[in-house]
Each structure stands twice: as C-alpha cells, then as structure tokens.
Image (tube, rainbow, N blue to C red):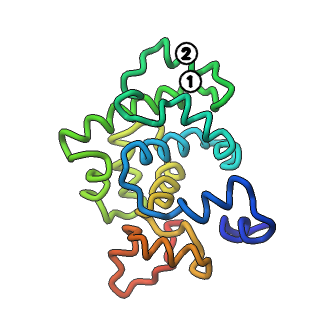
C-alpha cells in the first residue's frame, strides 16, 4: 500500500485518472475562477468518498456545473439543484450541491470586494492551515479542515501536495506555487498535516 499520493501514482503503471491529475494539476497554482470553483466543488463532493471516484466523474461534473462558470452556477435555483440531485454523472448529495451553488455565489461576490477568488486567496496568503480553515468556514459552506487543506494544497497555497523526491514537486515550485514563494530558509518539504 502506498504511503503518499506520489508513491501511489509512481508505484505502478500509469493510472488513467490519478497520473494526469498528479503530474499536471495537483499542487500547481490556479488563478482562473472556473478552475478554482471546480477544485472547490470536487473537494466538497469528495468528502467521505474516494478521490478516484471524483476524478472519474469529473467530466460529468463539468457538464452538470456548466463548465464551472461561477455566474451560471450562482444562478442555479431549487429546481436546478433538484435536477442535479438526480444526475448519475455526479455525486447526488443535495447538501454538497447546495453548498457548491452557495460557494459560487460567494465567489461572484468576491469580485466586487477583492477582484475575484484568486485575488481573495492572494490577499490572505500566507496563513497557517488552521487560519485558512477558520477563514474558509467564515466565508464558504461545507468547509472542514480536510476539504480546505486539500483545496489549498491542490492549488499551491499550502505545501504537501508532493513528496520532495517526486519530480513534480520541483515543477510545482517552478510554476509559482504560493507556499514556495514565501520560503525564507524554511524547509520546502513542510506539510500542514
């Protein structure tokens, strides 16, 4: 059994959903609002389930959530939420769907106050994992420590996405992962967990 995500992906043949995500997305900076909303929604919907299930349903999520366009998702009404709760292409959990729609509304609102979701993240960076959790709980719905931590690791705001020996680790740093920008002699292998 693999100790880490990096070990699991590197331990065998190429995995159809984990390898592309691990090698090209996980831990890399994300600025696009639709991509940030997608990561947030996927992390929420993964709660209590396997990441592989969510990655396998990713195309279904992209269709169901209109490409994760924040304005379109923010406009969903109760009828649309009920329709989504019957969609076998996604996890059909009404609480997770409602939280995702609420969070899209918050993201749209962040444009006026902060210039957007990416700017809001940058304005609060760097924070410790517990500080991020408190901030996300005040701002969004369905935010637990694991969801917040995985979202922030996956988008490069917290360290720990890759083991230091993993070749992707250096690529994520070179791409501008926020946690690595702030290293002032600190160990780049630090993890929030």
Give how far across and how far down residue 65 sits, in percent.
50, 31
Image location of residue 144, percent across then percent down: 49, 46
Q: Residue at x 40, y 83 (%)?
A: 186
Give the residue at x 57% y 35%. Answer: 61
Which residue is disc 2 drawn over? 82
Dots 1, 2 in contact, CB < 8 A: yes
Circle 1 sits on which residue? 94
Classify 160 as above or below 131.
below
Q: Residue 21 lies in what quarter of the image?
A: bottom right
Tell me the crowding category of disc 2: few under 14, some 14 to 19, or many 20 or more residues within 10 angstroms, Cα based: some
Viewer-side residue, 128 vs 1:
1
- 131 above or below 185? above
Task: Please tell me which residue is depicted at 57% across the width and 73% down the height of the picture.
Answer: 168
Q: Tell us which disc is closer to us: 1 or 2.
A: 2
Quadrant of the snapshot with the N terminus: bottom right
Residue 183: image x %, image y %? Answer: 36, 80
**Mark 1, residues whose alpha carbon is within 10 Å: few (<14), some, or many (≥20)?**
some
- Disc 2 is placed on an element classified as helix
- Residue shown at 75%/63% (left/top)? 14
User: Residue lying furthest bottom in this view?
Assistant: 185
**Image position, residue 102 (x, y; %):** 39, 29
The residue furthest left is 113
Q: Earlier in the sequence, mark 1 or mark 2?
A: 2
């Amino acid at each position: 059994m693999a100790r880490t995500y990096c070990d699991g992906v590197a331990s065998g043949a190429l995995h159809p959903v984990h390898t592309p995500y691990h090698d090209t997305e996980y831990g890399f900076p994300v600025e696009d609002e639709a991509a940030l909303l997608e990561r947030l929604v996927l992390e929420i919907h993964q709660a209590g389930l396997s990441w592989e299930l969510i990655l396998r349903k990713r195309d279904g999520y992209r269709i169901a959530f209109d490409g994760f366009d924040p304005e379109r998702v923010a406009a969903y009404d109760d009828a649309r939420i009920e329709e989504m709760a019957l969609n076998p292409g996604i996890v059909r959990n009404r609480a997770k769907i409602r939280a995702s729609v609420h969070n899209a509304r918050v993201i749209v609102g962040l444009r006026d106050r902060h210039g957007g979701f990416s700017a809001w993240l940058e304005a609060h960076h760097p924070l410790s994992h517990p500080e991020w959790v408190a901030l996300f709980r005040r701002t969004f719905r369905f935010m637990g420590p694991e969801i917040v931590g995985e979202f922030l690791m996956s988008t490069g705001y917290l360290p720990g996405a890759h083991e230091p020996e993993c070749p992707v680790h250096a690529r994520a740093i070179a791409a501008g992962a926020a946690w690595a920008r702030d290293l002032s002699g600190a160990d780049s292998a630090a993890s929030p967990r």
